Amino acid sequence: MLIPILTQRSHLSRVRRVIVKVGTGVISSPTGGLSTPIIRRIVKSASELLKEGKEVIIVSSGAIGAGFPELGLKERPKILPLEQAASSIGQIKLISEYDRLFRRFGHKCAQILLTREDIEERERFLNARNTFFSLLKRKIIPIVNENDSVATDEIRYGDNDILAAMVTILVEGDILIILTDRKGLLKPPVEKNEVINEVKEITSEIKKMASSKGKGRGGMESKVTAAEILTRVGIPVIVADGREKDIITKILKGEEVGTFFVPKSKEITGRKYWIAYLRKVKGKIKVDEGAKEAILLKGKSLLPTGIVGVEGKFYPGDTVSVVDLEGKEVARGLVNYSWEMVEKIMGKNTKEIREILRDLPYEEVIHRDNMVLSR
């Protein structure tokens, strides 16, 4: 589904797979619960995109906000068990509202709940992709949220802006539209409410302009982080006021609303970006000069014969760092063997490895297709 890099707003009408992130501040009612009129506007815009032949995925916050009043609480809980309880109640309300409104426009939606593990673990990642693609093929709109009812602090994204960026990479989306309760990234002083229309590069100065005010977990910082993630792989991001009428339509027509984060040229694919940057590095594999040269200059896979050391504990499918004799990172990749197995076969040739393993499932410790150079 990847299309040419869209570096200008005027080209946005060409996008086909649109990911829309809806913030808590957008769909929360001033009196508590959900704002049906705002959700209806979003659903209407999504339905119109479907009629134009586009595909739409919605990453929606709001479950905890919709659920905590049912617990007798006057404000959003700050401890994990209460957040999880509020989410479990609110998810029903949130998805029911989307389902009811989409059906009014003649469309169906589906709920997908994700945690960080679903993105980081390769098999779950692929299963999630297949689920998304199956739904999109049948013109069913996936409604995505973080699975707060079971996620712990260690495995949660913490806000849906980052989750939306991960989903955009996962499904190879063409654009991420982040709808918030602000007009976009504001110029200092923010009291003047002047929007920065375009960001060509996310510098330290741009990051300083973002503040953390808002109803949800993620403030403008997380939106800038999401934009930083996606623009590196050639995907544009727009942050805009989700309360504005027909905002999604205006964005895709190329109107100058919100803040447009200009994507860079695509240096690596979304999948390889996932391998290199979206997963925790579980260990290190040290290689000799010959293996280093084969990886960097000849585009080769990492074979056992060039390995001289192992650090950390990792298992098949984990991301590991490949370092040279001085400890400088050469590459990152998905490893085919556990740390214990690598220790047994490192420095040995194929014949010797067969004698150790009897069965040789992979000749490569890390295949070139699953490796990203660090230089």
Image: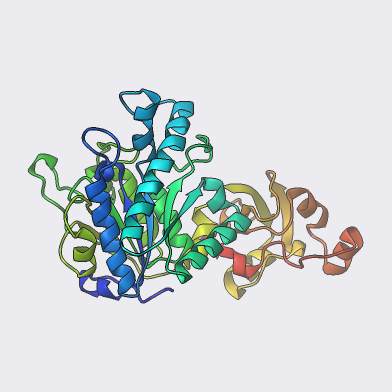
Residue at (52, 67) in percent of width and height: 134
The image quadrant of residue 52 is bottom left
Query: Of residues 267 and 292, which is closer to you in this image?
Result: 267
Task: Give coordinates of residue 173: x percent, y percent.
Answer: 40, 66
> Can see residue 323?
no
Residue at (49, 54) in percent of width and height: 277
> Can see residue 137?
yes
Protein image colouring: rainbow
Q: Is residue 75 left or right of residue 300?
A: left
Q: Is residue 172 left or right of residue 346?
A: left
The image quadrant of residue 136 is bottom left
Task: Give coordinates of residue 28: x percent, y percent.
Answer: 27, 40
Task: Give coordinates of residue 235: x percent, y percent.
Answer: 36, 65
Query: Of residues 192 and 1, which is closer to you in this image?
Result: 1
Q: Is residue 48 above or below residue 357?
A: below
| Image quadrant in which the N terminus is located | bottom left
Q: Tag count in the figure?
A: 0
Q: Is residue 277 left or right of residue 107?
A: right
Residue at (25, 36) in percent of width and height: 213
Query: Of residues 20 and 336, which is closer to you in this image?
Result: 20
Q: Is residue 138 left or right of residue 280?
A: left
Task: Give coordinates of residue 89: x percent, y percent.
Answer: 43, 35
Query: Of residues 243 and 371, which is closer to you in this image?
Result: 243
